[in-house]
Image: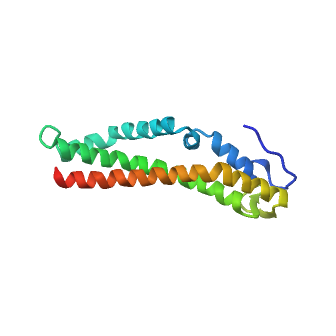
Amino acid sequence: MRQITSSSPVPPEQQPANEYEELKNSWLFCWVTLERFPYFRKLVWVWVWSWLISGPVAAASFPPQKYLGQFLLSGSAGASLVLILVLLRLYLGWNYVKSRLANTTVFYEESGWYDGQTWVKTPQEITKDRLILQYQVEPLLQKLRQTFYYFLLLIFLGGVAWSFV
């Protein structure tokens, strides 16, 4: 991971630009930085593996040999709950970095939770952070919002399908 150097007293790992780099390179959060198909494939992967939990629960409620439609819809809904939690975690992590980059002050801890300090960013730091925010983080948050919208549409369609099954 490449750390961005700064003249601030904030420890490097707590500087907003470095927090962005760390999040961008972390295992789960880097998914949002992927192109459309690999990103979608990761989400489908989570949904499919979530069936290991939701499938047996759905089968206990709606035996597949008797109520196939209800089994598939309820299993899908259960698997979707895990996917919603993953998407929510992604959104909250990126939104935290957004707020750190957007603020003109940086709260940081020198050695522990009990000795926090606040540092006012220099104009150069503000400009750098706003550029990262506008061109790197905002598109990722927009991608996550679009994913939520499509997901809500699928949940709605599942509800409509349930009424016909």
Q: Is residue 15 left or right of residue 68?
A: right
User: Which residue occupies 17% across, 52% down?
Assistant: 164
Whether residue 129 appears in this view of the structure is yes
User: Which residue occupies 36% across, 47% down?
Assistant: 80
Whether residue 110 appears in this view of the structure is no
Report the front residue among 48 and 110.
48
Q: Is residue 117 left or right of residue 148?
A: right
**Picture coordinates of residue 150, whole percent (x, y):** 41, 51
Report the front residue among 24 and 27.
24
Q: Tell how many labels.
A: 0
Q: Is residue 80 left or right of residue 134?
A: left
Q: Is 1 situated above or below 135?
A: above
In the picture as drawn, the residue positioned furthest to the right comes out as 7
Q: Is residue 46 left or right of residue 17?
A: left
Q: Quadrant of residue 114?
A: bottom right
Q: How is the image coloured?
A: rainbow
